[in-house]
């Protein structure tokens, strides 16, 4: 099963949802559950969709999935690591009104560089997504001990925000 999630950010992610409309046209037999969030173009195909999930249902879908395709949020990346799931990240693009800055591109690059996730960038299409879905998992490389440590991430975020203001 493929679990696709846009997370809970208050921004549309219509480009993400449209990928699954296109994917359904290519292979409607795929078992996909899509969490659509605040996106305005709800999936037109027959894949199962939910707007939001409570945390226990979300974790159940993570656990039962073979593959996670997700926005590049820190929560889903940590959960994919915890459950040892193959991960494809689709970073939100602020130029398309999907977020406020490019931090998801930076996180996606780090996860790719460490062999933890493939990345589908805005210039990629559904054919490339299908190639990633059918590819073997990457070979993970060692990450710094504090890379996925929530306290380290919070301190880094506080420093980043402090530097901005």
Image (cartoon, rainbow, N blue to C red):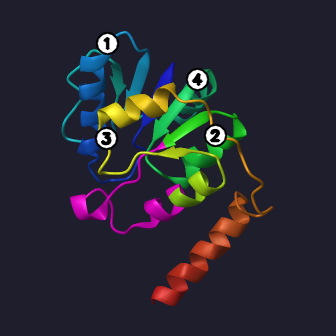
Residue at the image position 59 percent from the left and 60 percent from the top: 110
Circle 4: is it few (<14), some (14-19), or many (20+) Cα within 10 Å?
some
Q: Is residue 97 magenta?
A: yes
Q: CA distance from mark 4 to mark 1?
A: 17 Å
Which numbered tag is attached to residue 66? 4
Give the spatial CA distance, label 3 vs label 4.
19 Å
- Mark 1 Cα within 10 Å, few/some/many (few <14, many 20+)? some
Magenta span? 89-108
Residue 56 spot, x, y in % from top left = 59, 30
Rendered location of residue 103, percent (x, y):
45, 66
Q: Earlier in the sequence, mark 4 or mark 1?
A: 1
Please give the name of the residue rendered at 51% of the width and 80% of the height, measured from the top-left corner: 161
Q: Nearer the N terminus, badge 3 or badge 2? A: 3
Q: Secondary structure at mark 1?
A: loop
User: Where is mark 3, residue-wise?
Assistant: 16
- Secondary structure beneath label 3: helix
CA gap, disc 1 to disc 2? 26 Å
Q: Earlier in the sequence, mark 4 or mark 2?
A: 4
Quadrant of the rendered structure where residue 40 is?
Answer: top left
Between marks 3 and 2, how big is the CA–CA gap? 22 Å
Provide residue 30's location: percent of width, then percent of height: 41, 14
Which circle's residue, 1 or 2, is located before the other in the chain?
A: 1
Q: Does the magenta segment cover residue 1?
A: no
């Amino acid at each position: 099963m493929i679990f696709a999630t846009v997370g809970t950010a208050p921004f549309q992610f219509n480009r993400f949802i449209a990928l699954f409309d296109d994917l359904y046209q290519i292979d409607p037999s795929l078992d996909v559950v899509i969490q659509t969030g605040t996106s305005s173009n709800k999936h037109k195909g027959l894949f199962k969709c939910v707007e939001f999930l409570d945390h226990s249902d979300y974790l159940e879908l993570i656990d039962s999935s073979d593959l996670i395709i997700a926005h590049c949020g820190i929560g889903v990346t940590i959960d994919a690591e915890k459950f040892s799931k193959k991960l494809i990240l689709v970073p939100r693009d602020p130029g398309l009104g999907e977020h406020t800055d490019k931090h998801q591109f930076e996180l996606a690059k780090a996860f790719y560089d460490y062999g933890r996730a493939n990345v589908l960038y805005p210039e990629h299409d559904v054919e490339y997504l299908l190639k990633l879905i059918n590819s073997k998992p990457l070979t993970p490389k060692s990450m710094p001990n504090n890379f996925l440590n929530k306290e380290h991430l919070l301190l880094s975020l506080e420093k980043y925000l402090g530097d901005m203001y």
